[in-house]
Image (cartoon, rainbow, N blue to C red):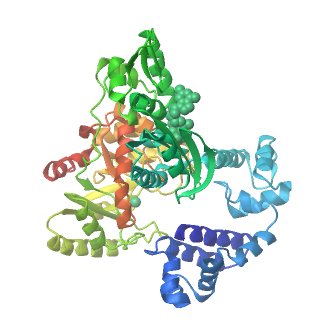
Amino acid sequence: MANADLAKLLYEIADLLELLDVAWKPIAYRKAARSIESLNMDVSELHQKKGLEGIKEISGVGPGIAGKIVEYINTGTIGELKKLVASAPKGVEQFMHVPGVGPKKALVIAKALRVSTIADLERACNEHKVCKIKGFGEKSEADILRGISIKTKGKDRVLLGAILPIARELADHLRTHPAVQKLEIAGSIRRMKETCKDIDFLVLSKKPKAVMDYFTTLHEVKHVLAKGDTKSTVILNSNIQADVRVLDEKSFGAALQYFTGSKDHNVALRSLAIKKGMKLSEYGLFDRKGSYLAGTTEQDVYLKLGLSYVEPELREATNEINIARQGTLPQLIPYNALKGDLHMHTTWSDGSHTTENMIRAALALGYEYIAITDHSRSERVARGLDVKRLLQHKKEVEQLRKKYDDITILFGSEVSIKPDGTLDYPGKILKELDWVIASVHSRFKSPPEEMTKRIIRAVQHPSVHALGHPTGRILLARDPYAVYLDKVASAAAERGVALEINSSPGRLDLSDANIRLAKSHHAKFVINTDSHSTDQMKYMELGIAQARRGWLEVKDVINTLPLKKFLKVIQH
Ligand code: DGT
Ligand code: CA
Ligand code: ZN
């Protein structure tokens, strides 16, 4: 059982209690939800081992909530939640999950308009009924519409960070079957797109029927939607759809090319083939008379079309085909190019693991250097460090350096950028730090001129080395804030401040398009995980993928530098 599912229910109870104007309890439920989220073991396992007492030992979980948790472990539901949902006016529960609405507004809307479905609410916004409710305006109406579109658009997509491990595990499982000679993951996952709709597998086999039988009866499979001779579609236990296609040797490469997409890349490639008097399909590349030219490997297909090989991450029809014709595609940054991770949190602020745990994890990954960057003092919910605790933490790091001399540990901070563009510690304190990331954590809704000015002011501060998650977006949940990134990138480039590519699966901020934009303004980049626990350090791969989708090379990314050079570059 996933702790995340339970935490979600607890958050929901908190929201509903708040809606019903119950005092204190919402805070208690949220606190418990947060502890469950960052718990290092499965709650049901904990319950099995230690019973109710074990649950009560979780920090922030009192006896009342512990009882609810045990109820969830035993029955899969919480009676209290059902009761609360029933007592809230119809529709409220759905509305409050629309980004930008929340419990309070949801209640007002449901009462004022007597609407009970998201579709009704959308219609009411379009008919300008919402802006007429007391306390709402045209801006909040537009916000709600945007929230609905995020919610419905994102419905069928899954974060790459969530689908990739599922796809890989299933791929490994399928590869064990003797009839499977070769298996590749195609589609948006192979392109490492930040969100994906489904899993596309391609299998090379002489025994398609055996492969179909095996695939459709795997224990990971919940429903079989279609089972054919060479293609099947299933829904996995994780509710994700997966397709398998079986191919023969001669068309495996052509099919891999075709089913990797993107659709737009394929359209451009096919029209190039036509121009050259050839025909390209998922079965192969053929000449005018229909004789087979290529198809066993993707490389052959691109080569015969007169192109250099196009890496999957570049196949988005952003001009890669023209540039491949000239043979001048970038040498993309390799997946093993990074020498350090420069954004991570510890138990000093809102991380789940100690500084020492994080250092050990970084050592295990073979890094030459890392930076410890807990939150600054204004981030109260994230237990940001006041000056006194910051200096205490620094002492701890100085001690740990003696114990771990195989890795260079920079002592830094993720310092919040205040609304006026000043930083959350005085200049004298910032000078004590080896590495400073400046990030926006508040007032996301300022007009773009203001936000741009605010961020540029921070970037120009002499102590800042990097700009954290530069657009603040949360995938499938929150739009980026409005900011003129070209101007920010130029200012950063001028000051030698790196723009972060935050590898956290729900951020991947900067986006691929923004990376290209920033690069065109001569910005340099740093790829970090922003880990809040040791296991999140593995997400670096996603940030590198994003950098590759943004056409970056080794020279664009400062944490590809070996230690000495890196330290030189960050000296201001
Ligand atoms: P997704 O699944 O929405 O995250 O994105 P993809 O790119 O994986 O799309 P999907 O699964 O619908 O199809 C996989 C690839 O197959 C797609 O990238 C290109 C190719 N493909 C599928 N349908 C068509 C089509 O109608 N025309 C063309 N040219 N290619 C297609
Ligand atoms: Ca797909
Ligand atoms: Zn952070």
Out of 184 and 375, give the one closest to the viewer. Answer: 184
Q: Position of residue 446 (x, y in %)?
A: 55, 48
Q: Above or below — where is 525 with respect to 37?
A: above
Q: How many marks?
A: 0
Image check: 12 left or right of 184? right
Tell me what residue is drawn at x 81 percent, y 41 percent: 127
Tell me what residue is drawn at x 52 percent, y 43 percent: 209
Image check: 344 left or right of 282? left
Q: Above or below — where is 426 with respect to 331?
A: below
Kindly give the residue lying farthest to the bottom in the view shown.
53
Quadrant where the N terminus sits is bottom right
Q: Above or below — where is 238 with respect to 33?
A: above
Tell me what residue is drawn at x 37 percent, y 73 percent: 347
- Residue 385, quarter of the rendered image: bottom left
The answer to whether residue 500 shows anywhere in this view is no
Kindly give the residue lying farthest to the right in the view shown.
114
Q: Position of residue 42 (x, y in %)?
A: 48, 75
Q: Position of residue 78 (x, y in %)?
A: 68, 76
The answer to whether residue 553 shows anywhere in this view is yes
Out of 39 and 135, give the one closest to the viewer. Answer: 39
- Residue 278, quarter of the rendered image: top left
Q: Position of residue 479 (x, y in %)?
A: 56, 47
